Amino acid sequence: MWIRLIPIVLFSVTALSLLTYQSFEIVHAFFDFFSNDSNNLDA
């Protein structure tokens, strides 16, 4: 039971941390895009 549970927990924590970091980067990119949209349209 514990031998099967440990990799599942590690995988879940790794996937959640990666998804959290990725979603944070996407939100940051959206804010960057919309805040700079009126300043430099050709970028």
Image (spheres, rainbow, N blue to C red):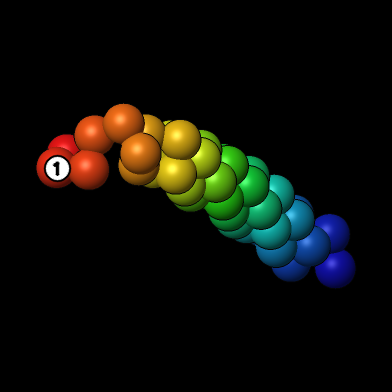
Whether residue 22 sits left or right of residue 10 in the image: it is: left
Side (left or right) of 37 relative to 31: left
Query: Is residue 36 toward the left or the right of residue 3 in the image?
Result: left
Q: 41 left or right of 17?
A: left
Residue at image x 35%, y 42%?
Answer: 37
Q: Position of residue 36 (x, y in %)?
A: 37, 34
**Residue shown at 31% from the left, 31% from the top:** 39
In depth, the one of 31 and 36 nearer the eye is 36
Along the viewing direction, whichever of 20 and 28 lies nearer the viewer: 28
On the image, the x and y values in percent for residue 35 come to: 46, 35
Q: Nearer the viewer, residue 10 or 43?
A: 43
Outermost residue, right side: 1
Q: Vertical placement of 34 versus 12: above or below?
A: above
Residue on which disc 1 sits: 42
- Residue 18 can be seen, yes or no: no
Amino acid tagged 1:
Asp
Residue drawn at (17%, 39%) of the image: 43
